[in-house]
């Protein structure tokens, strides 16, 4: 039985498109920072130690994620009091403005200490905006969808995070090719993906301005039944607070680590541990994402038939069981120590580059080893870039696609799952917080904590995986014991 | 119920060992540890409360 006031599926395509476009742009805005973290470290963080600079940037990246739960509270509250539509217009404006301004901040070399401070503030604003965006978009679509197809319709929103990553990588690679690597990394070319965002955001704002309010919320408001204090109702009353905790520890915590490990940590791993050349590494990620993205819809649809719980928990279990062997295989594909050298060419030293050796292997892999030194007093820095031959590249794509498949299993159904746990009057607030803690804190900190683990003595290139494996395993156990597919009473009282 | 405080205590011990430890490097930088402890403290409390609720049977009507 459909809810009173909820429209039929007619017109829902436009609603999904309008919500998704804005959400996708917000994810793009958020991800270009992470994807360009190494360049941002060099430009804004005053340290000659590249690992410290990277960690500082990851901390800034993590600050964007940590702030997301606060954004969830601030904008969730607004969304439950004033309405979904205007709240996620506000989040879009905030995200667009802060992203554009990041592209405008002068480097540390130009304005000194103000540079990292400004970047950090703008990153925090991005995190706040994103914290308010997702809950609104998922709630908005769900409140237009019939109950028996909610998984299918909300799964379109679920594609936007991955498509946002895809778009961010695509734009970065394209601009990098157009302006040249040198201009992109050492000049101002890296700014263009940030500046481009303002055009995308203006288009999204125009689309969203034409959207109507959610019918369920509009009816609630008409009847004078909206919440006056959604924060208190969500977290101050045990009946709802216990569901917030269950959503976090039984679902979003595991979903968050699976999401980030299968995409971001995989990207970081093949770049820094496997030493895959930058363009090839990101192409591998892009192709894997492209192949598997349709499965968000597949699993969202299947969750309408089979239930949300078993699909989400299956994705977590597969991650727990297969992450170590998959990452070990990725490492092995790029490991040149076991390959046969077919030729070696030493190139002339130039500028800061003391030596450059190009090694070709019998399977078609190419390894370029550059030793450089910024100043005579500095320790020489060795950089390796591996370009895989086609068979190796496609094996890597296949392995990453498998991990992204786990992502689609945990993430495809979760919007519908979260929406169904909470009543309309406090839905935006209640679902946003566990989602952004699970993804922002547990998931967003995967690269940071995994990097930290691998700096401990006695660890190896796979040790960082214990964090996501441990979290996903705990979530699987809690979810198995306590989650169900029971839905909240749909009457919006 | 016990996992929450246990994880937090383990993190605290790791932080103390690494910040004061003989191994110098990024792992001995107190800033990341402060961030991690500040974030995981309320989460550990939430996990403890969740454990308490489940022990009291608050989720029994949820089980499939």
Image (cartoon, rainbow, N blue to C red):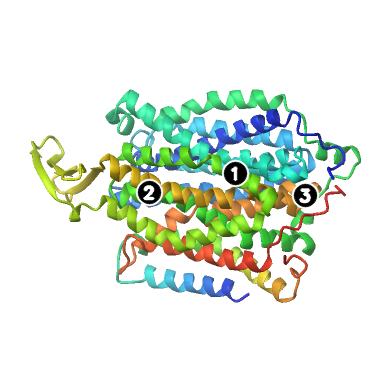
Rendered image quadrant of residue A456: bottom left
Q: Chain of mark 1?
A: A
Cα–Cα span, label 1 and label 2? 28 Å
Residue identifier under label 3: A426
At which x and y percent is residue A101?
Answer: 50, 31
Mark 1 and mark 3 lie on one chain; the one further toward the N terminus is 1
Residue identifier under label 2: A268
Mark 2 and mark 3 lie on one chain; the one further toward the N terminus is 2
Mark 1 and mark 2 lie on one chain; the one further toward the N terminus is 2
Give the mark toward the camera: 2 or 3.
2
Relative vertical location of residue A477 with respect to residue A346 in this rendering, above or below: below
Relative vertical location of residue A143 with respect to residue B30 in this rendering, above or below: above
Q: Chain of mark 3?
A: A
At which x and y percent is residue A422?
Answer: 76, 53
Q: Secondary structure at mark 2?
A: helix
Residue identifier under label 1: A298
Rendered image quadrant of residue A256: bottom right
Residue at figure coordinates x 9%, y 43% from the top left: A344
């Amino acid at each position: 039985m459909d809810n009173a006031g909820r429209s039929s599926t007619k017109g829902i395509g436009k609603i999904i498109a309008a919500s998704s476009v804005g959400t996708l742009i917000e994810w793009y805005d958020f991800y270009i920072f992470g994807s360009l973290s190494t360049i941002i470290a060099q430009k804004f963080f005053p340290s000659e130690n590249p690992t410290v600079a990277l960690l500082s940037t990851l901390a800034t990246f993590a600050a964007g994620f940590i702030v997301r739960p606060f954004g969830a509270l601030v904008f969730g509250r607004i969304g439950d009091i004033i309405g979904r539509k205007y709240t996620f217009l506000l989040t879009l404006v905030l995200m667009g403005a802060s992203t554009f301004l990041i592209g405008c901040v002068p480097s540390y070399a130009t304005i000194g200490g103000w540079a990292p401070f400004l970047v950090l503030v703008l990153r925090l604003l991005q995190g706040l905006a994103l914290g308010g965006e997702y809950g609104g978009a998922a709630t908005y679509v769900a409140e237009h969808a019939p109950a028996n197809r909610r998984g299918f319709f909300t799964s379109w929103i679920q594609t936007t995070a991955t498509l946002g990553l895809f778009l961010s990588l695509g734009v970065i690679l394209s601009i990098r090719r157009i302006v040249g690597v040198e201009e992109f990394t050492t000049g101002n070319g890296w700014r263009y993906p940030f500046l481009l965002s303002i055009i995308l955001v203006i288009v999204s704002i125009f689309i969203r301005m034409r959207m109507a309010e959610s019918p369920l919320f509009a009816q609630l408001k008409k009847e004078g039944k909206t919440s006056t204090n959604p924060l208190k109702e969500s977290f101050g009353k045990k009946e709802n607070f216990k569901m917030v905790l269950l959503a976090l520890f039984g679902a979003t915590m595991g979903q968050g680590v699976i999401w980030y490990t299968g995409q971001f940590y995989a990207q970081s791993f093949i770049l820094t541990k496997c030493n895959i050349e930058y363009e090839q590494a990101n192409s591998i990620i892009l192709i894997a994402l492209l192949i598997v993205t349709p499965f968000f819809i597949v699993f969202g649809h299947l969750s309408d038939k089979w239930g949300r719980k078993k699909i989400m928990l299956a994705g977590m279990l597969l991650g727990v069981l297969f992450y170590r062997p998959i990452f070990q295989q990725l490492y092995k594909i790029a490991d040149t120590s076991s390959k046969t050298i077919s030729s070696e060419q030493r190139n002339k030293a130039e500028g800061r580059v003391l030596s450059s050796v190009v090694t070709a292997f019998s399977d078609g892999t190419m390894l370029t080893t550059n030793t450089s030194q910024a100043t005579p007093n500095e320790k020489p820095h060795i950089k390796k870039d591996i370009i895989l031959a086609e068979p190796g590249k496609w094996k890597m794509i296949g392995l990453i696609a498998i991990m992204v498949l786990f992502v689609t299993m945990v993430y495809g159904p979760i919007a519908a799952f979260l929406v169904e746990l909470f009543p309309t009057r406090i839905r935006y607030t209640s679902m946003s917080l566990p989602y952004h803690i699970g993804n922002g804190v547990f998931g967003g900190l995967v690269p940071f904590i995994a990097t930290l683990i691998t700096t401990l003595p006695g660890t190896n290139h796979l040790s960082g995986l214990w964090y996501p494996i441990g979290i996903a395993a705990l979530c699987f156990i809690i979810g198995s014991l306590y989650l169900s597919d029971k839905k909240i009473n749909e009457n919006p009282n | 119920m016990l996992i929450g405080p246990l994880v937090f205590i383990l993190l605290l011990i790791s932080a103390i060992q690494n910040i004061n430890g003989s191994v110098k490097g990024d792992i001995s930088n107190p800033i990341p540890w402060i961030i991690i402890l500040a974030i995981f403290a309320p989460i550990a409390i939430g996990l403890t409360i969740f454990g308490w609720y489940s022990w009291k049977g608050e989720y029994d009507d949820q089980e499939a």
